[in-house]
Amino acid sequence: MASQPIITVSSLTKYYGDFKALDSVSFAVGKGWVYGYLGPNGAGKTTTIRTMLGLLKPDQGEIQIASINPAKDPVQALQSLGYASELPTLQTFFTGEQLLDFMGKMFGLATQARKEKIKQLLDLVGLEEWGDKKIGKYSKGMVQRLSLALALVNDPMVLIMDEPTIGMDPEATAHFRNLFTTLSKQGKTIFISSHLLDEVQRICTHVGMINRGRMVFDGPITQVLETFTQQWVIEAELKKVTKTMISALKKLDYVQDVKSEENKLRIELKEKKDLRGEISSEIFKHKGVLLSLNLHQITLEDAYLRALKGGQ
Amino acid sequence: MNAFQRIAIIVGYEWRRAIAKKKFLVLLILALALQVGLFALFYYFFTNPPPGFTVIGPSLEEVKAMMWLVGVLGPQSLFIPLIAIVIAGGSMSEEYERGTADILLSKPITKIEYMTGKFLGGLSLLGFVIALTTTLGATLAYGLFGPQESIQFVPVIYLVLLYANMLFFSMAFMFSEVFRRTTLSILAAIGILVASLFIDGILSTMYFISGGEQLYLEVSKWLPNWSVSNLPSFVASELITAPESPFVSMPGGDIQLAAAIIAVYTITSILIAALKLVKSDVTKRTS
């Protein structure tokens, strides 16, 4: 690992009665990473996060945030941590400003600093017009936005978010995606549990995948695509496909199989290599006219589904 | 920021949470209205006594001069314990039910500091409520019936009332943490209050039927309501030495025993709540 881990989860096991919710889950998150934590419903994502925050007691294993166990010393461990929960329910008797002020107090911010922070955060999450309104009057999306503002009130070094953009409109989702990228560039470590794989693929540097309480993958996002790409495929579109061309391609050492459909070819490779140059040369040898030639790379969604299948 | 500052923040939070509850406000208004109504009735009765009405023992003027005791001790019989239960019964459980316990306990605060803040916040609010009813009672007595005797003891009686009400307050607080359901916690605490009153009634009857069998009285002393109801009167009896004092009818009551019983119930309840909070997971939203 290049950077010093700021979150370390070691052999974490958690039971709910007889049900094993987490089974020896281990991973480490380095400083400045955007770590996407993926898994289907009930996989153990929220249990992991709540254990990381010291809300749940692990049956086995240990968690360290900035080298401090939050269950043993929550005051130190959680001082520079921000947390936005999944579908949050906030204290409806407060206004947005009052709740931000209260949370600021809990982090020991001075009165003037709180005042400035509240204005800044309400602007940041687009609730500047709603700050003096009771939270009971907020829509779900607005509560979600306020929850993110609350997570940022202490200018945290580590930001833990459980499905942070669920319930938000596409515009807000894009806004927060940009915000997370900006925060990451500022050196903050971001841990996101999400179902939105496209979102994770866009912003995360690293990915952890959990299924039925077990980690099925943990590594850089570039590695996840590599790991779960079982076969590299080149897709070619030609003006005309001939039998001799298909036969010649099949004879190549590095080609596993060639499938054709009208004027399209699907060339499955034996190696995980970009061999578009070699393939196009072979096609030109047989007077083929190429309209397009693409190396088909799997998406995070493909990798995720394959990882879950493997995990089962 | 030190532990005391963190506890103080939760105390302030708890006031906001409890005051926002309709149940609390309704009970408080009801208690104050009942107090005003009761004094209005007494005033009407004393100014328009039925023909032939005479007070046995003290004179009517002596009774009027001690009416502050009615105002101070009156709400204690039912409304103050009920308000104590309503404040404490939702203190911990409401945070679990709403899912806000996650938000609070994921901040830099220990579970014990959080619980202490919640307990002291609720207790100080109860103290404010008792101060309100006590002040109103004493003011009404003075305003309607003229100068009051021994009224200088109001602050002492106030402190005793607060101490006595810690019993049902801490019991409801314990249920709130153990059950993590507000309705269930309040019902359990009210159930114990009502059952205690009922059993006390039965034991008193048995005492009279048996011709003064002490065992019935001794057993009834360990019921939670006995000490809560009687300690303020016992202390008032000790303080107010006027021989014709019409409302303090229990001279020589066992103050130490009543105080000790309240302490036992309160400390046990707090310890159980703390143990449950520290040893168990913070449960997710339940409603």
Image (cartoon, grey):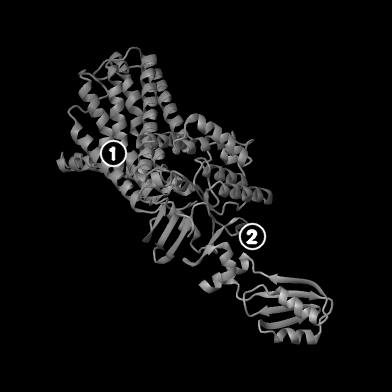
User: Residue at the spot x=20%, y=19% of the render?
Assistant: B241
Left or right relative to B200: residue A90: right
Give the tally of numbered discs. 2
The disc label shown at residue A198, or none: 2
Output the chain of dot 1. B
Instruction: Identify whether A84 is placed above or below B204.
Output: below
Q: Are marks 2 and 1 in contact (CB under 8 Å)?
A: no
- Residue B136 visible from this viewpoint: yes
Foreground pick, A225 / B192:
A225
Left or right relative to A75: residue B247: left
Output the chain of dot 2. A
Closer mark to the observer between disc 2 and disc 1: 2
Q: Amino acid at mark 1?
A: Asn
- Residue B54 visible from this viewpoint: no
Badge 1 marks a residue whose secondary structure is: helix
Instruction: Identify whether B189 is placed above or below B129.
Output: below
Tell me the residue that label 1 is attached to: B225
Q: Are marks 2 and 1 on the same chain?
A: no
Position in image of residue B93 (x %, y %): 42, 46
User: Residue at the spot x=51%, y=72% of the render?
Assistant: A311
Position in image of residue B33 (x %, y %): 44, 27
Position in image of residue A37 (x %, y %): 53, 59
Position in image of residue B203 (x %, y %): 23, 42
Q: Residues within 10 Å of mark 1 (few under 14, many from 20)?
A: many
Badge 2 marks a residue whose secondary structure is: helix
The disc label shown at residue A309, or none: none
Foreground pick, B22 / A257:
A257
Instruction: Identify whether A285 is placed above or below B190.
Output: below
Q: Amino acid at mark 2?
A: Asp
Q: Residues within 10 Å of mark 2 (few under 14, many from 20)?
A: few
